[in-house]
Image: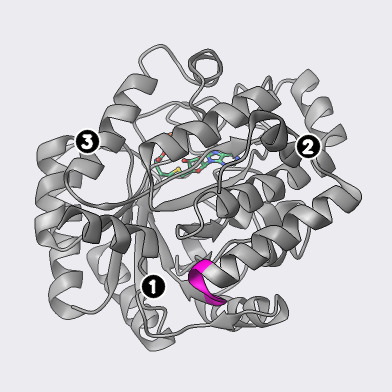
Amino acid sequence: MQLNTNQIKDALMATGKKQKELFAEASCIRKKAVGEDVYFRGIIEYSNVCEKNCYYCGIRRGNEKVNRYRMTFQEIKNCLAFIQKAQYGSVVLQSGELMTEEAKVFLLNLVDFIHTKYPKMGITLSCGELPYPFLEKLKEAGAHRYLLRIETSVPKLYKSLHPKDHSLKKRIECLKNLKRLNYQVGCGNMIGLPGQTIEDMMADLQFFQEMDFDMFGLGPYVIHEDTPLSTPVVQKWWEANKEKIFNQALNFIALLRILIPTCNIAAATALDVFHKTGREEALKVGANILMPSVTPNKYRNDYLLYQNKPCVDGHAHICAGCVIKKVESAGLNPVLGRQGNALHYKQRQNVKT
Ligand code: SAH
Ligand code: SF4
């Protein structure tokens, strides 16, 4: 569906009756385009070692309070067995960005192991800006989906959130490489970043449409006290604007569903920081993917990208029961044992051939 600039702006700022209408429209478009099924990806946050220093992120290199870990192969194997038993259908391997040879070999072996032992399991990676030849090897080994959020597509804002050696251009190039390699590509942004305007969010929406991504994982910015972005002024501003940020994140999800009806949209866990039912609300307004944590309990408190992360005390089996209930209470259909690839990707393939 095409919307003009004013309609998009109004939708992003919608509250009350206007917001209800937006959500109803998104829900209706979802039903027609992809139905009411919701798919799962068990996420394993297998390492919090990161070479980068993003100003917003709790596990940035500069945060010396973080207890660094790398899960062992055996620990990850146990998580995979759980995913198989819980019938999530897909795994997401997520980590900090680490370019050492050892880290690369580990990841490649891991993907190879998963694809061989669980050939029907969907494999999504979310490990930062990896070089083209390595992404190619990972694809050959069986990885077929990749999540790389742009965070913001606006150069000035991107600069204010990252040190000088982090490059928006490089991130976009990596996203293009993922498309070239025929991955199912997921992107996303953060909503409610300090200094972010409605026009900046509109630019992100335009970027997402132009890049023709298959999947989205976007969420509200959540402050983390041990990061450079968390100044007293920002803390005060963020606390005062929480409700607005939450609502704008939901509006953004609804708009994405309206503008790109056949994409997959994940309901981000960060939404639950704002409201207990945050992820359910996202499902109701257009999201169709949940990513329950499978990370072992002992590591969860060391993978705090943001403050007050939910479920850090939960075990994987508790999350399993919880996510199915969330889908049902949103009035949708939880689907187990299927990969749930994006219809948008399948359609892109058909167009190509
Ligand atoms: N290192 C990889 C993957 C892990 S970080 C990468 O950066 O792509 C995954 C996502 O966590 C990031 O893309 C960012 O959007 C999100 N994130 C980090 N800090 C956050 C914060 N303070 N609030 C909300 N999301 C955050
Ligand atoms: Fe590292 Fe990703 Fe956090 Fe940036 S957002 S510091 S790349 S884990």
Q: Nearer the viewer, residue 3 or 121?
A: 3
Residue furthest bottom in the image = 85
Residue 282 appears in view:
no
Pick the residue in front: 305 or 149.
149
Density class for disc 1 (Cα within 10 Å; few <14, some 14-19, many ≥20) is: many
How many C-alpha atoms fall within 10 Å of the one at disc 2: few (<14), some, or many (≥20)? some
Image check: 93 left or right of 60? left
Q: CA distance from mark 3 to mark 2?
A: 40 Å
Instruction: Report which residue position mark 3 lands on.
Output: 99
User: Which contiguous range is marked in magenta?
Assistant: 33-37
Which amino acid, by three-letter code, is at mark 3?
A: Met
What is the x, y in percent for residue 175? 30, 37
Which structural element holds mark 2?
helix
| Residue 162 visible in image | yes
Q: Which mark is residue 340?
A: 1
Q: Quadrant of residue 244?
A: top right
Name of the residue lying farthest toward the right: 16
Residue 225 falls in which quadrant of the image?
Answer: top right
Secondary structure under tag 3 reads loop
At x 75%, y 65%, the residue is 277
Decide: marks 2, 1 in contact (CB < 8 A)?
no
Q: Amino acid at mark 2?
A: Met
- Give residue 158's position: percent from left, percent from top: 50, 20
Question: Along the polypeptide, which appears first: circle 2 or circle 1?
Answer: 2
Q: Which residue is mark 2?
A: 13
